[in-house]
Amino acid sequence: MPRAFDDLDEHAIRRARIVVLHDPLPTEDGTTWLLSLVDLDGRVVAREIATARDGSLGAVVRPYLDVVGRRVDGEWLSDEDAAGRARHRARLD
């Protein structure tokens, strides 16, 4: 099972190269997303559940990336997963 962001050691943090927001679920408090850090081979390094009101993708992930000292580097790529749910990906610095 993937670890929480605050459980990652330095090696795992360096391996994480992509942040993915996926599996959105509307709730009374906004939208709940799965937030994953992924390595270049597509393996999930860490996963959190993020709930956010409407806002930019960067604003949703920023508090979680702050925990591991990383930032989004460049543009977000948006598409749908095999089930037709929204998925947003960005490279990390």
Image (cartoon, rainbow, N blue to C red):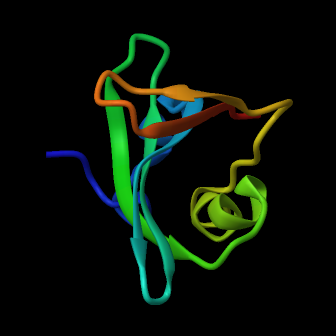
- In the rendered image of this protein, does residue 48 appear above or below residue 9? below
Q: Residue at x 38, y 17 (%)?
A: 42
Relative height, residue 42 to residue 57 (above, below): above
In-image side of 49 versus 20 (left or right): left
Answer with left or right where residue 63 lies relative to residue 19: right
Q: Residue at x 65, y 71 (%)?
A: 63
Question: At 83% from the left edge and 31% from the top edge, which residue is drawn?
Answer: 75
Image location of residue 77, percent across then percent down: 69, 26
Residue 72 placement (x, y as % from top left): 76, 42
Closer to the camera, 78 or 65?
78
Residue at image position (75%, 68%) is 55
Q: Is residue 45 above or below residue 51?
A: above
Q: Nearer the viewer, residue 84 or 41?
A: 84
Outermost left residue: 1
Expressed as whole percent of the image width and height from the top left, the position of residue 37 reads 47, 40
Q: Which of the image's four quarters has the C terminus? A: top right
- Which quadrant holds residue 52? bottom right
Residue at the top extreme, as displayed: 41
Q: Position of residue 8 (x, y in %)?
A: 39, 52
- Residue 41: image quadrant is top left
Q: Quadrant of residue 62?
A: bottom right
Above or below for 27 versus 2: below
